[in-house]
Image (spheres, rainbow, N blue to C red):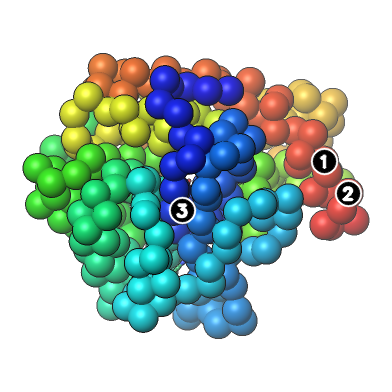
């Protein structure tokens, strides 16, 4: 589906973090809709290194790119020599998705090095190439805020802080290139399986149910509400950002808050499963967002963005892939 008039054929598109969840979806979007686009994936890929929380330091996985026909470069955005590999290309667009995407990482130095400092180097590269920069910010910038509008940020973990610092840094470039930050809310959809425990709860609950287990929710999950957004709508926002009427930072959500209990209820209905759920204490209380709901008025106005998937529709569209993952990766 083409969302804009821009013809990306014969354009050079760099996707940092392109072996990850959202980046790989972007790579396939351009490959499928603009077969003559030159798509370059730049990603650190995974190795066996973990953070103190036990999670992998990077989640990029080759299986997210099976069928990809473009160029793959393994590199670390925090390493200037690696970034130099991009110099030889006449870049038109950079979709910057590479980051420490794990909101529970406590190492502040590596978070800022990776999410903020490396972003500056990529912005400078974009200026040098006169490329558009569309980058991933996050709803985590809002943290404990109850207003989900640019200007009302209250991050409650270093991840959310790092994304807010990216948004501040981006302003320095507003008068130089096209620069659009997208604050994704809770994204779910195909190609997130390799994020392991950090994959969306839509996938995690779905797999628990398919395994014959009960869904494990945090206590009070009918009152913990988030704005859950299907990855196809995130792709829509990225593509439309290339024609943004105004540089800036925009929320990418549905504009509706739904509970984690809703997810389980929809999954059970679709899978025709009747089973009691299990409730466990929430270990992240101090740095947890109990409510998010994107204000998408500016996104509609300046990006012409219109979410296409409700939670019910997104889960329905995703379910065949959740079942495939269960059959091929778990069973
Ligand atoms: N998924 C969500 O719900 C969500 C919500 C808000 C914001 N975001 C942001 O969207 C972007 C994409 O997230 P995702 O869900 O696809 O996560 P992801 O972890 O699947 O993707 C990030 C990719 O970046 C790569 N990467 C990590 N460190 C790197 C480094 N130093 N150099 C090069 N590559 C590196 C990883 O290997 C991975 O492939 C991230 O910036 C994330 O912070 C995601």
Which class describes the residues within 10 Å of circle 2: few (<14), some (14-19), or many (20+)?
A: few
**Upstream in sequence: badge 3 or badge 2:** 3
**Mark in front: 3 vs 2:** 3
- The answer to whether 282 is drawn above or below residue 244 in the figure is below
**Label annotation for residue 15:** 3
Residue underneath mark 2: 327
Q: Alpha-carbon distance for marks 3 and 1?
A: 28 Å
Residue 289 location, x and y as percent?
37, 46
- The answer to whether 282 is drawn above or below residue 266 in the figure is below
Where is residue 85, by image quadrant?
A: bottom left
Answer whether labels 3 and 1 touch (C-beta < 8 Å). no
Q: Nearer the viewer, residue 203 or 172?
A: 172
Residue 172 location, x and y as percent?
10, 52
Q: Alpha-carbon distance for marks 3 and 2?
A: 30 Å
Residue 171 location, x and y as percent?
12, 47
**Upstream in sequence: badge 3 or badge 1:** 3
Residue underneath mark 1: 323
Q: Can the viewer see residue 41 in this picture? A: yes
**Can you tell me whether the CB of the residue at mark 2 lies under 8 Å from the nearest atom of ligand 1?**
no
Element assignment for label 2: helix
Where is residue 251, by image quadrant?
A: top left
- The answer to whether 41 is drawn above or below residue 207 in the figure is below
Q: At 18% from the left edge and 50% from the top edge, which residue is drawn? A: 170
Q: Nearer the viewer, residue 306 or 287?
A: 306
**Label annotation for residue 130:** none
Where is residue 295, by image quadrant?
A: top left
Q: Nearer the viewer, residue 207 or 21?
A: 21
Q: At 60% from the left edge and 79% from the top edge, which residue is drawn? A: 47
Answer whether labels 1 and 2 touch (C-beta < 8 Å). yes
Q: Nearer the viewer, residue 284 or 75?
A: 75
């Amino acid at each position: 589906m083409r969302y804009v008039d821009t013809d990306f054929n014969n354009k050079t598109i760099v996707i940092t973090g392109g072996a990850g969840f959202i980046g790989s979806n972007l790579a396939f979007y351009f490959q499928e809709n603009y077969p003559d686009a030159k798509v370059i994936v730049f990603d650190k890929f995974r190795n066996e290194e973990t953070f103190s929380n036990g999670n992998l330091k990077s989640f990029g996985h080759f299986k997210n790119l099976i069928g990809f026909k473009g160029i793959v470069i393994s590199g670390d955005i925090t390493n200037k020599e690696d970034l130099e590999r991009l110099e030889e290309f006449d870049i038109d667009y950079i979709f910057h998705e590479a980051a420490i995407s794990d909101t529970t990482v406590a190492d502040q130095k590596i978070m800022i090095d990776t999410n903020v400092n490396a972003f500056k180097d990529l912005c400078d590269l974009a200026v040098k190439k006169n490329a558009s920069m569309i980058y991933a910010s996050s709803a985590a910038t809002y943290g404990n805020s109850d207003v989900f509008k640019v200007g009302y940020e209250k991050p409650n973990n270093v991840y959310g802080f790092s994304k807010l610092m990216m948004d501040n840094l981006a302003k320095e470039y507003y008068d130089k290139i096209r620069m659009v930050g997208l604050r994704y809310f809770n994204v779910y959809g195909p190609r997130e399986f390799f994020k392991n425990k950090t994959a969306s709860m839509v996938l995690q609950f779905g797999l628990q149910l398919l395994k014959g287990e009960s869904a494990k929710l945090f206590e009070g999950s009918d009152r913990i509400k988030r704005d859950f957004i299907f990855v196809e709508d995130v792709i829509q926002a990225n593509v439309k950002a290339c024609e943004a009427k105004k540089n800036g930072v925009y929320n990418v959500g549905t504009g509706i808050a739904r509970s984690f209990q809703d997810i389980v209820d929809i999954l059970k209905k679709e899978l025709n499963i009747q089973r009691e759920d299990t409730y466990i204490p929430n270990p992240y209380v101090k740095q947890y967002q109990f409510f998010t709901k994107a204000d998408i008025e500016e996104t509609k106005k300046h990006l012409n963005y219109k979410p296409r998937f409700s939670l019910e529709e997104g889960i329905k569209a995703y379910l065949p892939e959740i079942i495939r993952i269960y059959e091929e990766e778990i069973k």
